[in-house]
């Protein structure tokens, strides 16, 4: 039997996981925490991904949780039970291979009893009006979170059903730099939730996140009763501890409940003044909310994240693959230890077909990583007309607004053999969190048939979905296959037959593999493609790279 690559084995494991547990290594030690009695489901903060990872530095300064709130409406985020606080634990940056936007949310349980909850996500405007409602797939509609000590503290990451409406909404709002919120809700069922205030959290986009020494930032917010009936609410302001010298004003001070009638608006402004000297990576996470006075649940909430980060993202392993069907595939690793790579559209490639006069932009899909450590992004451009001269530029942006637009000197480009473009299409079948197989091609080292057989074998032996296995079989028929690759595929077909001996899918896969034609080695060659570095006007001032390629 053929031994699969480690990345392929990891992919097989990923295929079998419905509710991925957050990584325990990224959570504070169990000895530091103690659960509450009962069920306490809630939306977790982003500590799992350590983005931003600056919260760990606060512990080194001995100031974490040391201060006490001074207002009756104020509450400090974090503590011995909930652990370090950061931005809400939800992401819209996970684009799958079909280019459909997804939202993921981490749900946890800080109680000593397992609990169940219904989860959904609403995208709202800056007045709280719902623009789009998202739910998980039917089988995940009710999620069970174990008790605190059994994995509830780490929680589970739940993915909403993908939505092209979300694509259009996010892309439009990002282009217009219009503010929007993503509000995640977990409704505890079959039990009374000990602390309902963390069952709803909101994360805000398209607000200025950057703090500058000696300047004051302002955050305008608006709450509006979008319903047909009055509601009694009260103020709640939550925040992480202030970095040294940071001062925030405008926090509501009235602790009394008040009535918000239909259509009524409340407007306000928070102001943050920064000192002249700031520690790199210092941040403040704050949330201003109206709480339903009768249920204790968040009624509406705005998030204001502020960070001092002057270091741009680091870019490495920039790779280009030119395919026979006139497409350009780009893969790159981007890291940002300060505020993290900006979600959704933080990494993009700009391309020109008119000699650099105008450029169009294409965002990269997030594949694997946590936006802090080296994180993998991929994009596919084209197809272009044959013999088109294409100029490429690149941009990586972090949450604070720092930008890197230099393509590394070590960037490489290759020309893939006929049929290798089908590896791009395999991404629609293979788990989107794995690097696309086409980027494993190397001149003189890696055989495209070998890569194809590895990925096909992983799917065939690790997935019983008939449609996916059949799609792999169809793709294989168009890929250049070596005799060694065919032998490996026959082994996989035999394994699949043993797993599901009566399956028509197994029989179909075996028939396709047995009928595969072996491609001569000369037709499987991977060739280096020349990269032309172009000195575009203003390149030095803008610290910007431009490279030229010809799509044959």
Image: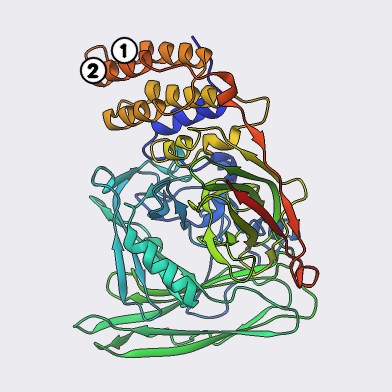
Residue lying farthest to the front in this orientation: 387
Measured as percent of width and height from the top left, residue 91 is found at 47, 57
Q: Residue at x 65, y 31 (%)?
A: 442
Which is nearer the eye, 102 or 418?
Answer: 418
Q: Residues within 10 Å of mark 1 (few under 14, many from 20)?
A: many
Label 1 secondary element:
helix
For the residues bearing labels 1 and 2, Cβ distance under 8 angstroms:
yes
Coordinates of residue 80 in the picture (x, y in percent): 56, 54
Relative vertical location of residue 411 with respect to residue 283 in this rendering, above or below: above
Question: Does residue 40 appear in this view?
Answer: yes
| Residue at 49% from the left image edge and 9% from the top image edge | 1
Residue 497 disc label: 1
Q: CA distance from mark 1 to mark 2?
A: 7 Å
Does residue 305 lie above or below 127 as drawn? above
- Say the numbered circle drawn on residue 503: 2
x, y (%) of residue 411?
Answer: 72, 46
Question: Relative to 22, is 401 on the left or the right?
Answer: right
Lateral position of residue 53 relative to residue 19, left or right? right
Secondary-structure class at tag 2? loop
Residue nearest the viewer, comparing 260 with 426: 426
> Which image quadrant is residue 354 in?
bottom right
Residue at (43, 25) in percent of width and height: 456
Q: Residue furthest left?
A: 228
What residue lies at 73% left-to-right and 78% top-to-bottom? 245
């Amino acid at each position: 039997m053929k031994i699969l690559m480690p990345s392929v084995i990891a992919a097989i494991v990923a295929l079998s996981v419905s509710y991925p547990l957050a990584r325990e290594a990224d959570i504070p030690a169990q000895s530091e925490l103690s659960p509450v009695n009962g069920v306490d489901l809630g939306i977790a903060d982003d500590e799992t991904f350590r983005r931003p990872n600056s919260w760990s530095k606060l512990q080194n300064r001995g100031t974490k949780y040391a201060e006490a709130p001074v207002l009756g409406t104020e509450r400090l985020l974090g503590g011995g039970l909930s652990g370090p606080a950061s931005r809400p634990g939800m992401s819209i940056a996970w684009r799958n291979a079909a280019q459909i936007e997804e939202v993921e949310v981490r749900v946890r349980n800080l109680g000593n009893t397992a609990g169940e909850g219904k989860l959904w996500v609403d995208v709202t405007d800056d007045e709280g009006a719902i623009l789009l409602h998202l739910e998980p797939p039917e089988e995940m509609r009710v999620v069970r979170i174990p008790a605190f000590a059994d994995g509830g503290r780490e929680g589970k990451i739940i993915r909403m059903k993908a939505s092209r409406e979300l694509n259009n909404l996010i892309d439009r709002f990002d282009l217009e730099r219009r503010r929007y919120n993503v509000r995640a809700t977990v409704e505890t069922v079959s039990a009374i939730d000990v602390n309902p205030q963390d069952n709803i959290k909101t994360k805000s986009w398209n607000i200025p996140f950057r703090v500058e020494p000696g300047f004051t930032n302002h955050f305008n917010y608006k709450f509006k009763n979008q319903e047909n009936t009055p509601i009694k609410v009260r103020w709640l302001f939550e925040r992480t501890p202030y970095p040294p010298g940071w001062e925030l004003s405008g926090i509501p001070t009235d602790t009394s409940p008040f009535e918000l009638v239909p259509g009524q608006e409340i407007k306000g402004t928070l102001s943050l003044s920064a000192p002249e000297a700031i520690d790199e990576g210092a941040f403040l996470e704050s949330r201003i909310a109206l709480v339903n006075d009768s249920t204790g649940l968040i009624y509406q909430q705005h998030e204001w994240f502020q960070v001092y980060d002057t270091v741009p993202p680091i870019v490495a392993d920039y790779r280009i693959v030119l395919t026979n069907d006139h497409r350009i595939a780009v893969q790159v690793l981007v890291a940002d230890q300060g505020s993290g790579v900006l979600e959704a559209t933080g990494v993009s490639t700009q391309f020109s077909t008119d000699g650099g006069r105008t450029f169009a932009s294409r965002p990269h899909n997030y594949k694997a990583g946590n936006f802090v450590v080296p994180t993998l992004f991929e994009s596919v451009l084209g197809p272009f007309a044959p013999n088109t001269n294409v100029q490429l530029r690149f941009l990586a942006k972090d949450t604070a607004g720092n930008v890197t637009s230099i393509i590394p000197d070590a960037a490489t480009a290759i020309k893939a053999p006929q049929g290798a473009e089908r590896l791009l299409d395999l991404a629609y079948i293979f788990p989107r969190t794995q690097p696309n197989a086409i980027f494993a091609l190397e001149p003189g080292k890696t055989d495209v048939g070998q890569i194809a057989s590895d990925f096909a074998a992983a799917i065939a032996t690790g997935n019983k979905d008939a449609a996916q296995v059949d799609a792999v079989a169809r793709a294989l028929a168009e890929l250049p296959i070596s005799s060694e690759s065919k032998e490996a595929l026959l082994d996989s077909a035999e394994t699949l037959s043993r797993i599901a001996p009566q399956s028509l899918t197994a029989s179909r896969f075996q028939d396709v593999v047995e009928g595969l034609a072996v491609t001569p080695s000369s037709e499987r060659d991977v060739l280096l493609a020349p990269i032309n570095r172009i000195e575009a006007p203003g390149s030095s001032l803008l610290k910007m790279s431009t490279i030229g390629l010809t799509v044959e």
